[in-house]
Amino acid sequence: MMNRFIRRIQRFKGWIGAAAALCIFYGLYLGLLDSPPDYYQGEVVRIMYVHVPLAHTALLAYGTLFVGSLWYLWKRDVLVDNMCHAAAGITAAFTILALITGAIWAKPTWNTWWTWDPKLVSFAVLLLIASGYLMLRTFVEDPDKEGRYAAVMAIVGGIDLPIIYFSAEWWRTLHQPLSISMRGVSMSGDILLPLAIMSLGLNLLFIYMLMIRTQMLYLTNLLEAKKGRLLSHAHLSHTSS
Amino acid sequence: MWTKGKKTSLILSLVLVAGALGYLALGNFGENLVYFVTPSEVRAFSPEQSQKKIRVAGMVVKKSIKTQADPVGLTFELTDGEATIPVVFQGIPPDLFKEGQGAVAEGHWQADKVFHSKMIMAKHSEDYMPIEMKRAGIKLPKKDFMKTLSP
Amino acid sequence: MTGFYLRWAGVIVIVGILALLTSQHYEKHLSSVSPDMVVTGNDSKTTLRVQGMVKSGSLTGNPEDGHAAFELLGASNSLKVQYEGPPPENLRELKTLILIGQWDAENKLFQARETALVTNYGYVASAYIVALLALIAFVFSMSRNVTFLYQEIKESKIYEPELGP
């Protein structure tokens, strides 16, 4: 029998996807049409409504990978391993997009596409860690070893998360300090709203993507196990339970 | 299971990640990675340090910008609250370069005690609001700019 | 499978409508003309948005009180400008900006009453297009993959309980 959890995902993922789409469309409307330009940056501030949520979602995706890896080492659940693998792919996608939109925002505001600023460097390192993780998973063939090695690597790489988040507070960077912090919220309401809606939308989209990608990896493994290409005891025991 | 090609690729991916983490550990945690220096530090420079191309960050002193038509450029002063240095810039400054806002200048601190630069970047603060609010004199909470220079 | 493609067609249509609305909004409220076009015109009624660079050494008056005079450079012509309005947030020499006001054809003077920053809509549009298209393509390919996998599994009857070797 197919895993109960996978079937439950198949039943509920549509709702999450619809909610994500609604939030993103409303966020786009607010961000592109309804919100005012910033006093200092003008219209370019609108790039923030897509760049910052993308970057935050990349951190959320890696956070999921980090927690999932701990969970996998503890319980050794194949489905959790598939979820970690899925989260790593999504982390890479969101990180690339955050870097690209960040470069596009940086040119008109800072006057440079890229600079060796601690926040940029630590964010690029996140992309390296995520792609290294994905490579590791491709090259190790024993599924049990693959899961264990990958989980350990993801946990060690987790050190990058606080570095990225607080780098603009800890070190000298071209980045502005955090807008939402212990100091309070240094954004007016009509600029905060599209940012919050887009963040919510992309976070929901991440959950939706995680569901689909976990399903995808699980089903691929299941098919391969069935076809006998890969003799995964774990998967076979899952299918027989 | 462990063919030769796979093993090399595996080692390669591990090296990649180890390198990334090593960079974080040694580069960022150490004192090595200093994105910019402040005007006070530039003032205290020894002659050897003046040879290197550096970035200086500070606030553009109000009423200090003076433009030149030929060659196109401008002069202004950068301050960190304690020391102030004069900057000579050649070229057209970025649109968001502004008096009373942060700027990072890339160039050389020369023997004439003037910073010569051909590249400036604008360093903006973390507050965002429409122009109407700004004109109404509303101030949003933000970190003191001088403190962002040397946290 | 039809339902799957229909849903995605819906997503594409909504994205298209939003893109259209945004570009219309931009054309209507935020597009600007160059100083060269203003100088040759005689229309003094319509409010214009002119984009150009403040000429080096031409700024006089007191921008902080909202009074200033300067020249705005275009590709080949420059425009004499009189600014009267709220203190402009950033008016300085060698800056490219947008002036909102009327052209006084008799005195060959542009009467500006407001400034705005260069819109840079190309940057905004490219950031959104890159991010949205990439996300849509990523989700689409994964969803299609899952749909195919389910079909394949159904065909290979993997639903039936099966024991290991």
Image (cartoon, grey):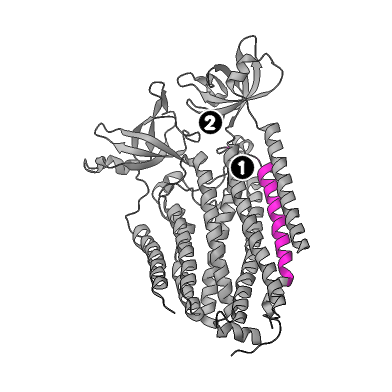
* Residue A17 located within the stretch drawn in magenta: yes
Instruction: Tell me the residue at 63%/28% (across/down).
Output: C32
Foreground label between 2 and 1: 1
Residue receiving disc 2: C90
Please give the range of residues in magenta. A11-39
Residue receiving disc 1: C125
Q: Position of residue C103 (x, y in %)?
A: 65, 17
Disc 2 is attached to a residue of which chain?
C
Local crowd size for mark 2, using a 10 Å CA cut-off: few (<14), some (14–19), many (≥20): many
Secondary structure state at the residue bearing disc 1: helix
Instruction: Tell me the residue at 37%/66% (across/down).
Output: B15
Q: Position of residue A83 (x, y in %)?
A: 58, 72
Local crowd size for mark 1, using a 10 Å CA cut-off: few (<14), some (14–19), many (≥20): some
The residue closer to the viewer here, A169 or B71, is B71
Q: Callout 2, which amino acid?
A: Asn
Q: Is residue A215 visible?
A: yes
Q: Position of residue A15 (x, y in %)?
A: 74, 65
